[in-house]
């Protein structure tokens, strides 16, 4: 809003009070207008919304003694509501803005000093007047449980979320039918408060009393518990990408609470819980599995068959002299990456010692031990 817009507006007329009205009269007049025209009490009524914004702007100036004094002096200096700013040299009857600036230069402090606090970047009035502009909707969270196969391959799940429509019983006010919410005294209905740090920087943040609504409810609506939102639920289809892991949080843009006054909708954050698989595990884009082999297979080498998550068995070559715990790789049998390629299946070999040996097998092993002539594998433990 430009300087000329502020000076041209008659804030007393907006609130319907006399220029000599007391602070209490101004406060009372604003609260009545705010109560009757608040956007939450008149959903979709653009005229009421505009009236509320105009009244909030007027109250911001007139409720502050210092700003009210500067406002009165400014209007007196430029002839009150009769002044209309035109372009410099725009013709008879239209005083150029530059001419007015020059005429005001003789005033104490000059034009800039006179209006610096009222219209400057640090003015809390400008922030409050815009606080009812577009607001982004709140984010919401949800959880889904997936089978291991669903997490690896990706899936679409249906989630139920609370409705973001206004409660039909209270029409979105959050107050019990037959009653109305009151204007928050902490922020005068703007929903925002300003705080300064060291007298230099000013910050605007949601009012803690009304949580940014600008209204307080003494008697909550029993249908929505004072939230102003309907109790019905919506079903949202959420696409879970391939390769999600247990505990991962996925952001679904624009599926949260609808914004206010044309603001963007919030986001939906989905926490994924993946059930463990009896055979497979996951490491990034790779799947893992432990495969038992016999001592003979590990020593002599063997071609063995192993399962895959996708279904078909695959053949894996176990090289001779494979030690226990070695990991072999089967390419292309893992998790699908974002670029469409596949990760691998990592196979860890577990050498199994038989629980029972026949007499013949025992004799054969004894003969093997004698012929192998293997050195003591624990010698290094004793400095050997």
Image (cartoon, grey):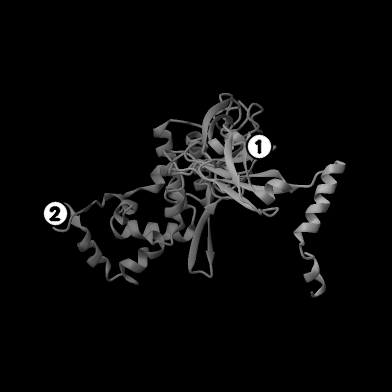
Q: Relative to residue 245, is residue 94 drawn left or right?
A: left
- The residue drawn where x is 53% and y is 70% is 198
Residue 381: where, in percent of width, then height?
80, 70
Q: CA distance from mark 2 to mark 1?
A: 55 Å
- The residue drawn where x is 38% and y is 65% is 116
| One can see residue 350 in this view | yes
Q: Quadrant of the C terminus?
A: bottom right
Badge 2: few (under 14), some or many (20 or more) residues near its Cα, within 10 Å? few
Secondary element under disc 2, as helix, strand or loop, is loop
Q: Relative to residue 95, is residue 64 drawn left or right?
A: right
Q: Are marks 2 and 1 in contact (CB under 8 Å)?
A: no
Q: Which one is closest to the eye, mark 2 or mark 1?
A: 1
Badge 1: few (under 14), some or many (20 or more) residues near its Cα, within 10 Å? some
Residue 330: where, in percent of width, then height?
55, 45
The residue beneath circle 2 is 90
Q: Which label number is shown at residue 218?
A: 1
């Amino acid at each position: 809003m430009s300087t000329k817009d502020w000076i041209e507006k008659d804030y007393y007329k907006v609130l319907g009070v006399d220029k000599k009205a007391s602070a209490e009269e101004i406060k009372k007049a604003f609260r009545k207008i705010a109560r009757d025209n608040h956007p939450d009490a008149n959903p979709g009524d653009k005229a009421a919304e505009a009236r509320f914004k105009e009244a909030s702007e007027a109250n911001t100036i007139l409720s502050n003694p210092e700003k009210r004094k500067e406002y009165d002096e400014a209007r007196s200096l430029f002839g009150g509501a009769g002044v209309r700013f035109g372009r410099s040299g725009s013709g008879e009857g239209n005083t150029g803005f530059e001419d007015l600036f020059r005429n005001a230069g003789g005033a104490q402090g000059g034009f800039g000093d006179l209006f610096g606090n009222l219209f400057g970047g640090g003015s809390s009035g400008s922030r409050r007047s815009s606080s009812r502009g577009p607001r982004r909707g709140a984010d919401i969270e949800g959880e889904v449980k997936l089978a291991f196969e669903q997490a690896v391959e990706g899936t679409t799940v249906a989630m139920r979320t609370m409705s973001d429509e206004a409660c039909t019983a209270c029409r979105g006010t959050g107050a019990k039918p037959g009653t109305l919410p009151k204007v928050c005294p902490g922020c005068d209905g703007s929903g925002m408060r300003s705080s300064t740090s060291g007298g230099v920087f000013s910050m605007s943040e949601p009012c803690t009393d009304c949580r940014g609504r600008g209204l307080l409810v003494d008697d909550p609506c029993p249908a929505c518990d004072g939230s102003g939102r309907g109790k019905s639920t919506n079903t949202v289809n959420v696409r879970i990408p391939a390769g999600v892991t247990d505990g991962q949080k996925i952001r679904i843009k624009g599926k949260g609470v609808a914004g206010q006054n044309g603001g963007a909708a919030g986001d939906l954050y989905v926490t994924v819980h993946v059930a463990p698989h009896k055979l497979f595990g996951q490491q990034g884009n790779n799947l893992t599995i432990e495969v038992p082999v016999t001592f003979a297979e590990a020593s002599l080498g063997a071609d063995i068959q192993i399962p895959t998550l996708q279904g078909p068995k695959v053949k894996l070559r176990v090289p001779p002299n494979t030690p226990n715990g070695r990991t072999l790789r089967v390419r292309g049998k893992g998790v699908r990456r974002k670029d469409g390629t596949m990760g691998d299946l990592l196979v860890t070999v577990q050498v199994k010692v038989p629980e029972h040996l026949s007499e013949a097998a025992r004799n054969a092993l004894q003969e093997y031990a004698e012929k192998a002539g293997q050195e003591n594998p624990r010698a290094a433990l004793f400095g050997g």
